[in-house]
Image (cartoon, helix red, strand yellow):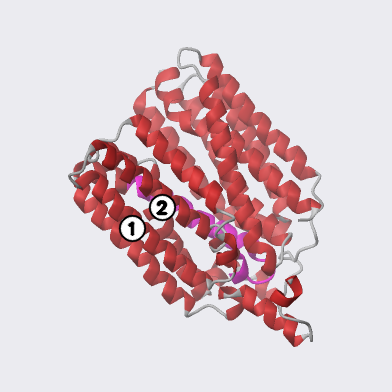
Amino acid sequence: MGAAMRRIHVGNALSAFGLGFTVPYLYVYVAQVRGLGAMTAGFVLAVFAVAALIVLPFAGRAIVRRGPLPVLLTALVLAAIGAMSLGLAGNGPAVLAAAALLGAGQAVMQPALATMIVDCSVAETRSRAFATQFFLQNLGLGVGGLIGGHLVDTTRVSSFTLLFAIEAAMFLLLAGVMATVRMPHAPRIGDAPASSAKGSWRQLLGNRAMVQLSVLGFVLFFACYGQFESGLSAYGVEAAGISTSALGTALAANTLMIVVAQFAVLKFVERSRRSRVIAGVGLIWAVAWVTAGYAGLGHGSREMATAAFVSTYALFGLGEAMLSPTVAPLVADLAPTGMAGQYNSAFALVKQLALAVGPAVGGPLAASLPAPYIVTFLLFSLSISVLAIRLGKRLTVAQDQPWLAARSRVVARGGAPAESVSA
């Protein structure tokens, strides 16, 4: 990795570390510590999603025109102000306003950092770069959550103020690190041909492969990430009788699987068709939902149900480790020259929509109708495989098998295949 990429990865880890400090405790902080009630806490969580949906369409255009670094620095300052304000807010309107700032800043960070990774990598190294990003994000979230859990005290508001102050400091530290990054020159909308400058959303929607990938992405996030903290946890507690400590163990198993498996699966993923890898994830998650069904609907012991439920989260983690070096690089490779920021923001918007709809659908369904809940999301997982195979038919060799395209270019120039070179 070059110096710029190293700083970007440090930035990813710092931002995840800061988020891990506060995200698990946000509901408790608003509802109990500040005494604003469950309804206000629910509104705060909704504001995060709404803020993201509002700013992401504009973020993509700003990244294309100005570059990802200025947009990222602006987002970090907004997020730092929002985090500090949230730690000091004592009433409902102030909490909601602070949450809007923090949510908007967090939402813009993702496509800005992703575009920086695209600009600092080539097709052959992009999968590894995004795998490293995902690894560090999960490590940062896990470490941040662990340390934050030892700092908070629900009887002292000051402990939460300290928590949000640390998060704000992480964002400002990240801004300082990112300000030192020397980005390679990458085409922007002003450098691109006139036909590309007109593109924006109309051009993106005209890209059939990107539209199909966006639909696939919505199903991916809806059927997995959108269920972690709502539907699946509600199902585990209500149907499977899982204790809160076992639920924490399941979440830890998910993070541990990602950390352990990320680079173990990377070589396989890099040498496989991206569409087939995504289809394989759909099958793995289908097995995960069957395992969850056994945990809640089977007739085994409490220990067997707990083991099955923990295994469900671990299987989801394996699928996530396979997706991280696959989906994000594919979004970048589908983007025309100078439009990576627009495409990254559009995909982030799809993700936010899925994360907003997923809990709203999954939570009530899991609590009241556990068997239909499992069947529904089992079918969603199988549909991931179907959509991925269909997407593969629309991708070029360079988009679906970048390693094969790279080797072909080497041979065409009179060199040896990639394997011989590395040997």
Q: Which mark is residue 287?
A: 1
Which SS class for mark 1? helix
Q: Which residues are magenta?
A: 332-360
| In the displayed structure image, the side of residue 202 where residue 373 appears, left or right | left
Q: Earlier in the sequence, mark 2 or mark 1?
A: 1
157 in the magenta segment = no
Quadrant (top left/top right/bottom left/bottom right) for the C terminus: bottom right
Type of amino acid under label 2? Leu
338 in the magenta segment = yes
Asked if one can make out residue 88 in the rendered structure from this viewpoint, the answer is no
Q: CA separation, marks 2 and 1?
A: 8 Å
Residue placed under numbered mark 2 in the picture: 315
Mark 2 in CB contact with mark 1 (< 8 angstroms): yes
- Please provide percent x and percent y for residue 123: 67, 69
The furthest residue to the top: 155
Decide whether the magenta segment is chiefly helix, strand or loop: helix
Query: Where, by quadrant of the figure, is residue 35 drawn?
Result: top left
- Please provide percent x and percent y for residue 384: 39, 65
Residue 41 vertical placement versus 334 (above, below): above
